[in-house]
Image: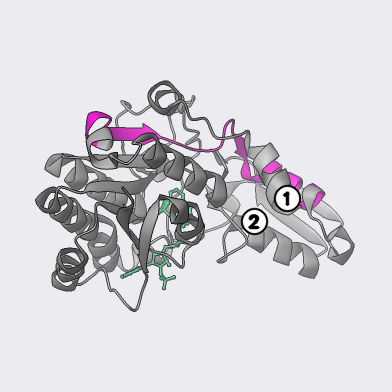
Amino acid sequence: MRSKILLFGSHGQLGWEMQRTLAPLGEVIAFDFPEIDLTKPESLRNVLRDYAPQIIINAAAYTNVDKAESEPELAYRVNAEAPGVMAEEAMRLNAAFIHFSTDYVFDGKKGSAYVETDTPNPLNIYGKTKLSGDLKVQEVGGSFLIFRTSWVYSLRHGGFVTKVLEWARNQETLRIVDDQIGSPTWARMLAEATAQVIAQGRGEPVGYLREKAGLYHLAGSGSCSRYVWAEAILQLDSKKEEQVVTKLLPAKSSEFLTPAERPVNTALECNRSKIIFNITLPCWKFALRLMSQ
Ligand SMILES: NC(=O)c1ccc[n+]([C@@H]2O[C@H](COP(=O)([O-])OP(=O)(O)OC[C@H]3O[C@@H](n4cnc5c(N)ncnc54)[C@H](OP(=O)(O)O)[C@@H]3O)[C@@H](O)[C@H]2O)c1
């Protein structure tokens, strides 16, 4: 049986890739702002009730980490309240719900990669609102998966990879922090892995995901600093001849004043996804190489 899949955030880095990877699994109905505004719970409920999907996927989020500091209510509505509504409606419709969370729920002080049972302690509004969303979804329960991921990139939107490529074309010297560590995750790999998990349900995804319900870490394998990541981005750039940059220098986070505090080391340990779904995302540098071709 082909499932009816409702996807939110279809213009975002992950949502864009999800549209393509979900297509073989069913009828995909995709929404993004402004067709649907996740700050309006009633219209969200109406859309979900009207379409009555078997699978709901939320790739939408308020992801501007710095701006969230001055728009906490808006971030909370998108990152916490909306996923709560989706989870409730999924329960009501007997649908499966797949949601994405972030490494920024952690304070980065552990000193080694985080596992799912580690206690979150977000340092900024974005992390706090995402954690509230996770808790709401878990409270509702049912057939849900939360994939907590990290440092998502693609060539869409103004993420880190596109920014480094742009700076390299405009500046001779780049200074990039070497005291923030994470697990870069190519949006396409995350989308493919999510589709594989749904496909494992073999036409009965709701029951399958109910059996496997819970929180999972799913990010590119390995970890690196933003400085090392930038170095790899520059090396693997397929249009290197356009670069004007001649020096890449390491810097400290304290040298750049940003509205939101960033955790220092939020590498994610993804063994649980490997054990339960037999899924491991490739090494971050391998994925970056593929994306750069
Ligand atoms: N990016 C990262 O580094 C990162 C790291 C860890 C976890 N994650 C998580 O991974 C997931 C996917 O992230 P991403 O990087 O793909 O995000 P993204 O590129 O920023 O896409 C998010 C999408 O949500 C939409 N959206 C925002 N507010 C909305 C609203 N009020 N109503 C409807 N749609 C709205 C955005 O639309 P507009 O563009 O119009 O605002 C955008 O299309 C999110 O759950 C995020 O928290 C991301």
Note whether 223 is above or below 1 in the view shown: above
| Residue 90 visible in the displayed image | yes
Instruction: Tell me what residue is drawn at x 33 percent, y 55 percent.
Output: 58
Residue on which the image places disc 2: 161
Image disc number at residue 233: 1
Which residue is farthest bottom?
Answer: 34
Note whether 7 is above or below 236 in the view shown: below
Note whether 228 is above or below 118 in the view shown: below
Within the displayed image, which quadrant is ligand 1 positioned in?
Answer: bottom left
Instruction: Tell me what residue is drawn at x 36 percent, y 48 percent.
Output: 100
Is 221 on the left or on the right of 4, as rendered?
right
Q: CA distance from mark 1 to mark 2?
A: 7 Å
Say if the magenta span includes residue 215.
yes
Is 25 on the left or on the right of 96, as rendered?
right
Front residue of 124 and 115: 115
Callout 1 touching callout 2 (CB < 8 Å): yes
Amino acid type shown at disc 2: Val
Residue range in magenta is: 210-235
Q: Earlier in the sequence, mark 1 or mark 2?
A: 2
SS label for mark 2: helix
